[in-house]
């Protein structure tokens, strides 16, 4: 009778190592996905209103380009002053690398004329029809092309 009872009572050993591995894998996955879901942004430095410079340094007109943004990524531009532009043209934000090539060509011409690109300034005039995505894309182009001086101007204020 003893022999029959001992056969039925077996000790069961469960190996929890795969469960622990799965737990750590899930924890790693959730940490990774929360890091990816955090919003990423680059800093936009704006001047302090309390520090007004009486005579700000002037940028040479030959080192300035103004981008007039329109709807659907269309951009008109002029170099120099609006009254007497050195060069005018139009390009498209999403047309391969047309805008990037134009900005790079402008930088190379400035370096030829002034032997430096420290005064290279891009003035951006978004219109009411310009979308938020187009604004972000134009700011990305400024970052990609390493343009250190760029100005966002309200089109209505610029007309006054």
Image: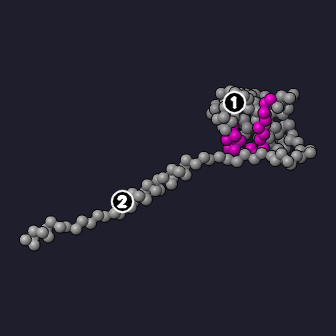
Q: Which residues are magenta?
A: 138-156
Q: Which residue sits at x=51%, y=50%? A: 33
Q: Is residue 141 magenta?
A: yes
**As drawn, 78 above or below 116:** above
**In terms of depth relative to the viewer, which is nearer, 78 or 124?**
124
Q: Dot 2 lies on which element?
A: helix
Q: Which residue sits at x=82%, y=31%? A: 157
Question: In this image, 34 relative to 17: left or right?
Answer: right
**In terms of depth relative to the viewer, which is nearer, 89 or 140?**
140
Q: Are the two marked residues, 1 and 2, in contact with CB atoms closer than 8 angstroms?
A: no
Residue 46 position by quadrant? top right
Question: In this image, 8 relative to 78: left or right?
Answer: left
**Residue 107 appears in the figure:** yes
Residue 67, given in percent of the width and then of the height, sits at 76, 33
Residue 74, given in percent of the width and then of the height, sits at 69, 28
Q: Label 2: which residue?
A: 19
Q: Is residue 69 magenta?
A: no
Q: Which residue sits at x=46%, y=56%? A: 27
Q: Dot 1 lies on which element?
A: loop
Residue 1 position by quadrant? bottom left
Question: In this image, 2 relative to 101: left or right?
Answer: left
Task: Give residue 130's mark.
Answer: 1
């Amino acid at each position: 009778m003893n022999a029959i009872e001992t056969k039925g009572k077996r000790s069961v050993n469960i190996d929890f190592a795969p469960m622990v591995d799965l737990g750590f894998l899930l924890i790693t996955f959730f940490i990774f996905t929360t890091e990816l879901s955090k919003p990423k942004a680059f800093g936009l430095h704006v001047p302090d209103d309390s520090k007004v410079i009486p005579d700000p340094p002037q940028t040479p007109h030959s080192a300035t380009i103004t981008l007039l943004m329109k709807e659907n990524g269309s951009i008109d531009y002029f170099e120099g002053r609006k009254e007497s532009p050195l060069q005018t043209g139009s390009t498209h934000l999403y047309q391969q690398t047309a805008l990037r090539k134009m900005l790079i060509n402008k930088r190379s011409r400035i370096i030829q004329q002034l032997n430096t690109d420290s005064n290279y300034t891009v003035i951006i005039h978004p219109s009411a029809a310009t979308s938020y995505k187009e604004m972000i894309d134009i700011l990305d182009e400024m970052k990609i092309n390493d343009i250190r001086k760029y100005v966002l101007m309200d089109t209505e204020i610029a007309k006054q």
